[in-house]
Image (cartoon, helix red, strand yellow):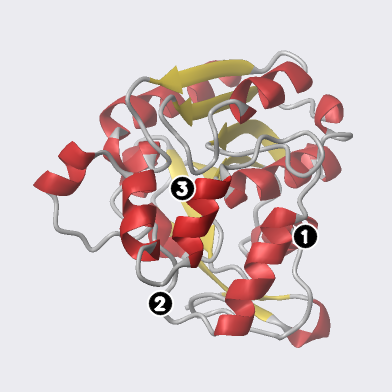
């Protein structure tokens, strides 16, 4: 498995599949590259997909030091460097969308087109999930089922048995989970969103309560020329359950963005 090395000797495991223009896929909080299992192949007709395990997850190192979405963006650039990629399309979902905001704002020459899925501008201006959901997620007796219900519709859960790759990396140490939570919670890219110059698609499940759908228009209105698409009936893991809608939507956007 290839690795990128960043400051302090931290090694980040990354994965490359397919052929074509590079597409960097960024997973959600406390998740590794398996977040994209079964979906990344939807892009292999036009793209080479690149994923990596955030520090604290998967086969990457797990230093017990502060993490941040801005720092994860720097890590992502180190991965692109290690893979020999000068420029890529970037598609981030959930916390990965927060990371993608920093990549596009701070490394504009590295991003050809940008997709921000089920994400938030963070902190001061973002719309947070309700306290009722927070309580259910904090209770070990209800957390797993609550997370499943926030990710997927009842119909999907009735028809599938998993494994569900969006529920967190089971191998993460508890300190790394806490550091991911803090990094996502402290994200605030509001001031830099207007500087993003890459063609941008903002996509969100219309029934997302985990990362409330109200965040989507906030981001789209903040980024010049951004396009907003809501997927009816979809919850947080729209890209997986509604892949027959979401993947073509993203593919067509990326194709049109560089036509």
Is there a contact, CB below 8 Å, between mark 2 and mark 1?
A: no
Can you say which quadrant of the picture contains the C terminus? top right
Marks 2/3: CA–CA distance: 27 Å
Residue at 72% across, 62% down: 183
Marks 3/1: CA–CA distance: 21 Å
Front-most of residues 71 and 94: 94
Q: Position of residue 160 (x, y in %)?
A: 14, 51
Query: Is residue 133 positioned above or below 165 on the image?
Result: above
In the rendered structure, which disc, 2 or 1, sits on the residue that comes first in sequence? 1
Look at the numbered disc 2 and give the secondary structure of its residue. Answer: loop
Q: Position of residue 82 (x, y in %)?
A: 66, 67
Residue at 38% across, 38% down: 239
Front-most of residues 157 and 12: 157
In the rendered structure, which disc, 3 or 1, sits on the residue that comes first in sequence? 3
Marks 2/1: CA–CA distance: 25 Å
Q: Position of residue 114 (x, y in %)?
A: 63, 32
Q: Residues within 10 Å of mark 2 (few under 14, many from 20)?
A: few
**Label ID, residue 48:** 3
Left or right? Give the position of 97 relative to 223: left
Residue at 46% across, 20% down: 230
The residue at which mark 1 appears reads as 74
- The answer to whether residue 88 of the structure is visible from this angle is yes
In the rendered structure, which disc, 2 or 3, sits on the residue that comes first in sequence? 3
The residue at which mark 2 appears reads as 170
């Amino acid at each position: 498995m290839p690795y990128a090395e960043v400051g302090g000797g931290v090694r980040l495991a990354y994965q490359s599949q397919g052929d074509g223009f590079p597409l960097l896929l960024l997973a959600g909080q406390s998740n590794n590259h398996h977040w994209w299992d079964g979906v990344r192949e939807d892009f292999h007709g036009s793209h080479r997909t690149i994923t990596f395990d955030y520090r604290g997850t998967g086969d990457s190192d797990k230093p017990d030091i502060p993490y941040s979405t801005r720092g994860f963006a720097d890590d992502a650039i180190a991965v692109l460097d290690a893979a020999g990629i000068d420029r890529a399309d970037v598609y981030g979902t959930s916390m990965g969308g927060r990371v993608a905001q920093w990549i596009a704002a701070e490394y504009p020459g590295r991003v050809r087109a940008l997709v921000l899925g089920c994400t938030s501008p963070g902190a001061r201006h973002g719309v947070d999930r309700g306290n009722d959901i927070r309580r259910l997620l904090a209770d070990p007796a209800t957390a797993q089922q609550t997370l499943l219900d926030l990710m997927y519709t009842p119909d999907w859960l009735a028809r599938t048995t998993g494994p569900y790759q969006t529920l967190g990396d089971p191998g993460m140490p508890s300190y790394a989970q806490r550091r991911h939570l803090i990094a996502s919670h402290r994200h605030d890219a509001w001031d830099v969103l207007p500087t993003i110059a890459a063609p941008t698609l903002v996509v969100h499940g219309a029934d997302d309560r985990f990362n409330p759908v109200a965040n989507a228009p906030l981001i789209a209105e903040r980024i010049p020329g951004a396009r907003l698409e809501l997927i009816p009936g979809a919850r947080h893991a729209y890209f997986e359950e509604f892949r027959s809608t979401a993947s073509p939507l993203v593919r067509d956007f990326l194709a049109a963005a560089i036509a």
